[in-house]
Image (spheres, rainbow, N blue to C red):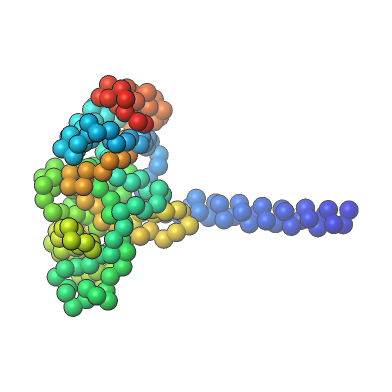
Amino acid sequence: VALEVALSTVLLAAGGLFLISFFREMRVDKGFEVEHIITQDVSYLSPKYARGVRRLAVEETVTKMSQIPGVARAASTSRLPLRGEDQVSELRDPAQAELSINHSELASFRFITPGYCQVLGIPLRSGRFLNGSDKDQPTALVSEEAARFLWPRQNPIGRLVQGIGSNAPMLRVVGVVGDVRASGLDRDPPMTVYEHYWRMQPIAMSFVLRTRANPLAVAGALRTVLSSADPEMAL
């Protein structure tokens, strides 16, 4: 009996610690909003979605989703928050050549349509968000952490940022946005660069919708938009 009581005490204590940890993580600043948000992952692996076709399909789908009754705004991203990181590269300011070798850290690169940050409530700290005029321009948003790393106590707007690789473009920073947790609520937000999806055209995208009411009320309409565009699309 004493052993059972002791074991029960240990289990209760462990459970209490788990709940404390759980609620602590739930109160952590995620960097984005979750209320009135609905998401849908889509794959463009089919051969019929060549690069030019793929980016037009994403653009047209976002437009149609934004017209669904009850939807306030729609956008798309190559990777949602808390889904981990897939496009990762060292981050540098090409204008600071003397710091290029020793002053670089890994950053997460995400490719978004205009309006993505507004849909998820990712705050703008300075400059502006991406818009339609950035479609064919080498522009980008950077997170606060990336701005602090590259340009401490300096204005990052108008600076250049670049990943590593022979095809990595030099991107002009047009805005700084809040930090977002990418790999879990228990992990610090990574440095992040947001580019217009038009350049990269990922083969998998996630659509995000901000609704004016219950997100479930528009879930059916969202799938109708996707199935009408392509009945064979993998959701």
Residue 148 position, x and y percent, is: 28, 67
> Depth check: 182 or 23 in front?
182
**In the image, 193: left or right of 172?**
right
Look at 61% across and 51% down and name the residue there: 19
**Most distant residue in the front direction:** 47
- Which image quadrant for residue 145? bottom left
**In the image, 168: left or right of 205?**
left
Look at 25% across and 24% down and name the residue there: 229
**In the image, 74: left or right of 131?**
right
State the count of labels.
0
> Depth check: 47 or 191 in front?
47
Residue 185 position, x and y percent, is: 46, 54
- Which image quadrant for residue 9? bottom right
Residue 164 position, x and y percent, is: 23, 63
Q: Is residue 189 visible?
A: yes
Q: Is residue 213 visible?
A: no
Look at 15% across and 54% down and name the residue there: 139
**Most distant residue in the right direction:** 1
> Depth check: 112 or 74 in front?
112
> Depth check: 75 or 126 in front?
75
Residue 29 position, x and y percent, is: 42, 54
Does residue 205 sit above or below 233 in this rendering?
A: below
Look at 16% across and 68% down and name the residue there: 94
Does residue 231 sit above or below 179 in this rendering?
A: above
Where does the C terminus fall, quadrant-wise? top left
